Amino acid sequence: STPLLQAARKRNSLDLLELSEAELEEQFVRGDGPGGQATNKTNNCVVLKHVPSGIVVKCHQTRSVEKNRKIAREILQEKVDLFYKGEDSDVFKEKKASEKQKQEKKRRAKENLERKKLFKEMQQLDEE
């Protein structure tokens, strides 16, 4: 089920499992990465754990603790939904649909490139 959890963080998901605050453990830690003193001195990174499933989410996307708390809850909700519903989850279905669109777009781009090559070859033959 680990690859399924990587599909989380897609928007537009409507039918997600609800999380109760009693099932969550929340910590505030120092973030990592670029940012220098602003990052190293403040505890604005949120670590959220869903106790029943053991899923942990770490969010340090903004400098605001409140925004990070909200984002962490959204990500955790999607991951928990994936954990319990698996391939029946809306998040998983959206991920599959977007992958399919991406593959279709690549295929069309490849076809267009082939057409352009053929067109250039035809032009060169006409010129000779």
Image (tube, rainbow, N blue to C red):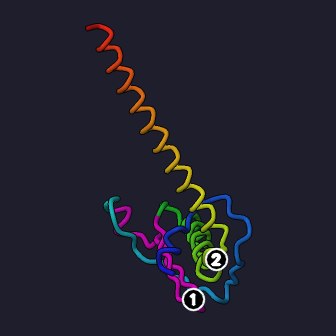
Q: Quadrant of residue 113?
A: top left
Q: What residue type is labelled 1?
A: Ser
Q: What residue type is labelled 2?
A: Asp
Task: Identify the residue at horizontal 49%, vertical 60% (top origin).
Answer: 62
Using the image, tell me which numbered label, if any, was put on residue 62.
none
Residue furthest to the left in view is: 128
Residue furthest to the bottom in view is: 52
Residue 98 lies, in percent from the top left, at 57, 55
Secondary structure beneath label 2: helix
**Magenta part of the chain:** 37-60
Task: Identify the residue at horizontal 54%, vertical 84% (top origin).
Answer: 49
Task: Identify the residue at horizontal 42%, vertical 39% (top origin).
Answer: 110
Q: Classify residue 63 as left or right of residue 116.
A: right
Residue 66 lies, in percent from the top left, at 58, 67
**Residue 58 inside the magenta-drawn segment:** yes
5 vs 36, nearest the viewer: 5
Badge 1 vs badge 2, beta-carbon distance below 8 Å? no
**Residue 52 inside the magenta-drawn segment:** yes
Q: How crowded is mark 2: few (under 14 residues within 10 Å), some or many (20 or more)?
A: many
Residue 70 lies, in percent from the top left, at 61, 68
Q: Name the residue under label 1.
A: 53
73 vs 66, nearest the viewer: 73
Disc 1 to disc 2, C-alpha distance = 11 Å
Secondary structure beneath label 1: loop
Q: Name the residue under label 2.
A: 81
46 vs 109, nearest the viewer: 109
Q: In which quarter of the image is residue 67?
A: bottom right
